[in-house]
Amino acid sequence: MSTNMWRGRWYGMSPQGDAHQRAREVVRPTGTIVRGKFPSRKNGRMVDHEGLLELDAIYLFECSPEIVRYREQPLTLTYPDGHRLRRYTPDFELVLRSGEIILVEIKPTRSLVNDEVQHKLARWPSTSPIPVSALRF
């Protein structure tokens, strides 16, 4: 028989948590990326992360009073790129206290100079990289 010894206040949506199915599963795990699960109080469930930068972002999401809820890999978008049809799955979807929904891609600053990353960002006109140091939580 197990008992819940935790006596803190629950901030998740419900004790069962937010029912969420990731839009994309890891196809081929490699040994270079740290993957794991984070116990989210805001979501009331375990949140998957792929890499330490995503884990750092989750900590920021949990601490921010402006973020009500967030989901990892919430959906897959399809967009034309020349003669090809490409797919893109953002890392997170944030639901703000104002009701606004924001899609977030987590990238290290050094990857923003990569031509392929610049090409992908150019496909989404409203997308502009924001350094973490500029964010206010």
Image (spheres, helix red, strand yellow):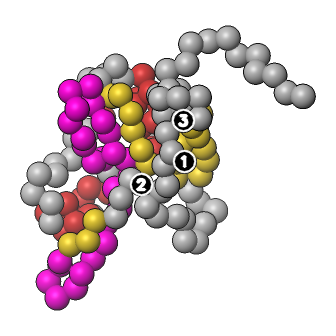
- Along the polypeptide, which appears first: circle 1 or circle 3? 3
Find residue 71 and report its horizontal and vertical position in percent: 42, 44
Q: Are marks 2 and 1 in contact (CB under 8 Å)?
A: yes
Name the image quarter holding residue 113.
bottom left
User: Where are the magenta residues, as a range?
Assistant: 80-104
Q: Are marks 3 and 2 in contact (CB under 8 Å)?
A: no
Secondary structure, magenta segment, majority class:
strand
Identify the residue under disc 2.
Answer: 73
Q: Is residue 101 magenta?
A: yes
Q: CA distance from mark 1 to mark 3?
A: 14 Å
Give the farthest residue toward the left: 125
Residue 52 makes an appearance in the image: no
Question: For the C terminus, which image quadrant?
Answer: top left
Identify the residue under disc 1.
Answer: 48
Question: For the N terminus, which image quadrant?
Answer: top right
Name the image quarter holding residue 10.
top right
The kind of residue on which mark 2 rests is Gln
Q: Name the mark on residue 17.
A: 3
**Position of 23 relative to 70 (above/below):** below
